[in-house]
Image (cartoon, grey):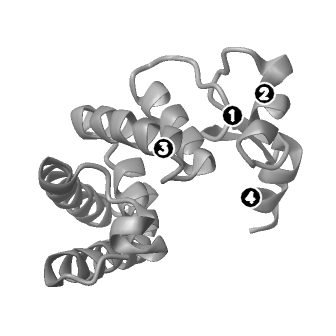
Amino acid sequence: MTNDNNTAALSAELIRMAQADQSASPGANSENPAERLAWRRLAAQHGDRLHQIMDEYGWPTAELVGDDAARGAWLVAQHADRQLDVQRRALRLMEQAVEAGSASPRELAFLRDRTLVNEGREQIYGTQIAGVVGGAPVPWPCEDPERMDALRGEVGIEPFDEYVARFAMS
């Protein structure tokens, strides 16, 4: 991680954004419209700020801001559902970072699926859950469901059945 003051401040800001995101995320699907609105407002503010960060720094990699802050940037991009321009840009920059060995292929897979679903397209890795049917989580449609677990394994994601078992227990 670079020691200069700008990147230290950026790191702290991304970590704060991720913490605020995690605190507010239960509001995303709340029955309370005010909580849903507060979630949308926060996600939009964070998406706008991530857009500015990408303008200035490109993708905030772990080398630049540290592991926690890089994960925070990914989380903000992941939740910028109403800002497809931000998600698409983050996806492109993160793809380049993964190719350079500077970002997580696993996180990239989640962001790719999230962006595809937000575009109304079929996902690749089955990371995005559409809902629950008969008590079992069901993914949004996938391009190639027969290869989904193999593709998940290539990027370090557990098989789909193990993944959804975590949701069923919570």
The x, y position of residue 16, in whole percent, is: 30, 80
Identify the amino acid type marked 2: Met
Q: Which mark is residue 100?
A: 3
Give the class, few, some or many, for how many residues have Cα within 10 Å of label 3's Cα (few <14, many ≥20): few
Q: Secondary structure at mark 4?
A: helix
Assess whether mark 1 and mark 2 are in contact (beta carbons under 8 angstroms). yes
User: Quick one: label 3 or label 2, which is nearer the N terminus?
Assistant: 3
Callout in the foreground (1, 3): 3
Q: Residue drawn at (54%, 33%), measured in percent from left and top?
A: 113
Assess whether mark 3 and mark 4 are in contact (beta carbons under 8 angstroms). no
The answer for how far apart the CA atoms under marks 4 and 3 are is 33 Å
The quadrant in which residue 132 appears is: top right
Residue at the spot of label 4: 167
Identify the amino acid type marked 4: Phe
Give the class, few, some or many, for how many residues have Cα within 10 Å of label 4's Cα (few <14, many ≥20): few
The answer for how far apart the CA atoms under marks 2 and 1 are is 7 Å
Residue at the spot of label 2: 148
Residue 39 in view in this figure: yes
Callout in the foreground (4, 3): 3
Identify the amino acid type marked 1: Gly
Side of 46 relative to 74 (left or right): left
Who is closer to the viewer here, 86 or 161?
86
Question: Eyeballing the image, is 133 above or below 45?
Answer: above
Identify the amino acid type marked 3: Ala
Q: Residue drawn at (64%, 25%), measured in percent from left and top?
A: 124
Residue at the spot of label 1: 126
User: Quick one: label 4 or label 3, which is nearer the N terminus?
Assistant: 3
